[in-house]
């Protein structure tokens, strides 16, 4: 172990010990369901069971602790966040009795605002500014400079990284005696958690293979590794809001540089929804999309059979108003739901003829006339749920044989976003 590694582990040990005034180590649980499914020894690090239901409390607390030690008279902190970082900072403000000003986009759901305010316990002020996060961030930074406050960034900061690294320190202490991980799977957003945990694992468990996972719609680490430097993604899919970051943190990239790009796995957003529902229905775990990333990535790790695999479950702040969308996406990924635009003849008996093409497992979940396309035909938005892909192949064959004209729009995001 190099002196630098030893120094980092020492600071992480101090951060980990300091955290104990807030909460005991989050559980590391062997999961029998996933172990049997993948033929491996799968352990889940349950960061969704922290006081704020995510790992973000670690970095926020550590950064605030060190800032107060360095400048005890500066007791005003600022951040910009619509989610877990805001809640972590609010909790830390309540603990230290400091003032916090948290900037959130105007579009932030009321549930997240109320929860952040609750964690702050009267120590935080929430300001809603901007429709987009970039506007919110600029407002927070401008205010911070004018007020002489201390800005707490969500991930690209050495004290934040040091705090997040306590997660890995706990993992190694919690595994049964004599057991070391063969593979550790880490979710990636801005890179604070992964940069911290990687440094601990390299120093204290060098034999562990590390795999990273990002959402397909926000592969900021993978693209940076491919380019050899951080890049700003031109577009980000915000569905996995806890990991939808357009640019990996510069500090964090320096730690992760040299990682083979193929060690960064990409999770399709719709498949992630199936994983969320699976864990909810089988294990009773309420996971947010980012919190399910590492669990979902097990599907793409064929080499895990017979090995000890640690999966970091990063958060469980899920808004149940999103559940219908999650279910819809999961059904589409599983091949159990499709949307069509059907050209239906405007004549008596045409609807009856179409219904005759349906199989015993085919269920119409949406039937809506869009407009009259021509004098003798009308366009119908048709949603069908069935048992699987084979059932849809049979249905389409029957519709073809009956002369119906239709278009499958399930994967056309432009059309479905407008009319579904």
Image: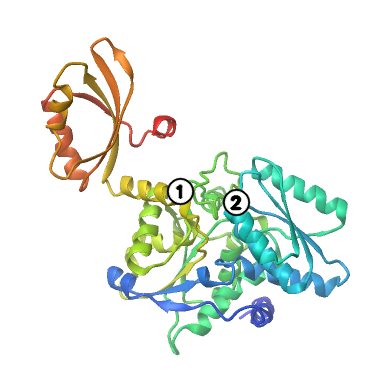
Q: Residue most toward the bottom?
A: 177
The mark nearer the N terminus, 1 or 2, is 2
Residue in the image at 42% along x and 52% along y: 323
Percent of width and height locating residue 61: 69, 71
Residue in the image at 16% along x and 36% along y: 395
Q: 272 or 225: which is nearer to us?
A: 272
Q: Which residue is mark 1?
A: 216
Percent of width and height locating residue 287: 46, 62
Q: 119 or 133: which is nearer to us?
A: 119
**Where, by quadrant of the figure, is residue 411 drawn?**
top left
Q: Secondary structure at mark 1?
A: loop
Residue in the image at 29% along x and 21% along y: 379
Percent of width and height locating residue 293: 45, 59
Q: CA distance from mark 1 to mark 2?
A: 28 Å
Q: Which residue is mark 2?
A: 110
Q: Residue most toward the front?
A: 348
Residue 28 shown left or right of residue 68 in the figure: left
The crowd level at tag 1 (other Cα within 10 Å; few <14, some 14-19, many 20+) is some
Q: Residue most toward the top?
A: 375
Residue 63 can be seen, yes or no: no
Say above or below: 234 vs 277: above
Residue 238 can be seen, yes or no: yes
């Amino acid at each position: 172990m190099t002196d630098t590694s030893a120094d980092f582990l020492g600071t992480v040990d101090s951060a980990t010990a300091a955290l104990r005034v807030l909460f005991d180590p989050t559980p590391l649980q062997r999961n029998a369901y996933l172990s049997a499914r993948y033929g491996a020894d799968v352990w889940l690090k349950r960061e969704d069971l922290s006081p704020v239901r995510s790992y973000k409390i670690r970095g926020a607390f550590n950064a605030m602790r060190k800032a107060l030690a360095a400048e005890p008279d500066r007791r005003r902190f600022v951040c910009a966040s619509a989610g877990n970082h805001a809640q972590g900072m609010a909790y830390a403000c309540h603990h230290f009795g400091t003032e916090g000003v948290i900037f959130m986009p105007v579009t932030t759901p009321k549930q997240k605002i109320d929860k952040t305010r609750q964690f702050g316990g009267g120590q935080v002020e929430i300001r809603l500014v901007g429709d987009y996060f970039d506007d919110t961030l600029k407002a927070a930074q401008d205010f911070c400079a004018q007020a002489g406050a201390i800005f707490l960034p969500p991930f690209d900061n050495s004290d934040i990284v040091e705090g997040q690294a306590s997660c890995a320190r706990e993992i190694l202490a919690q595994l049964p005696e004599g057991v070391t991980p063969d593979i550790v799977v880490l979710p990636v957003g801005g890179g604070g958690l992964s940069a911290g945990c990687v440094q601990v694992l390299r120093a204290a468990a060098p034999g562990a293979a590390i795999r990273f996972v990002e959402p397909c719609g926000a592969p900021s680490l993978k693209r940076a590794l491919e380019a050899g430097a951080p890049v700003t993604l031109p577009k980000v899919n915000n569905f996995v809001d806890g990991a939808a970051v357009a640019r990996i943190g510069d500090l964090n990239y320096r730690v992760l540089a040299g990682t083979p790009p193929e060690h960064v796995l990409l999770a399709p957003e719709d498949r992630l929804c199936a994983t969320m529902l699976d864990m909810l229905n089988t294990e009773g775990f309420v996971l947010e999309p980012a919190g399910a990333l590492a669990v979902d990535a097990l599907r793409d790790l064929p080499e895990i059979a017979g090995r000890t695999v640690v999966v970091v479950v990063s958060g469980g702040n899920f808004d149940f108003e999103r559940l219908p969308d999650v279910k819809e996406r999961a059904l589409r990924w599983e091949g159990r739901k499709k949307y069509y635009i059907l050209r239906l003849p405007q004549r008596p008996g045409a609807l009856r003829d179409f219904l005759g093409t349906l199989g015993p497992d085919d269920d119409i979940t949406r039937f809506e006339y869009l407009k009259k396309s021509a004098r003798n035909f009308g366009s119908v938005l048709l949603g069908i749920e069935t048992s699987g892909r084979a059932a849809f192949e049979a249905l389409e064959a029957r519709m073809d044989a009956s002369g119906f004209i239709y278009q499958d729009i399930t994967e056309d995001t432009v059309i479905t976003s407008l009319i579904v």
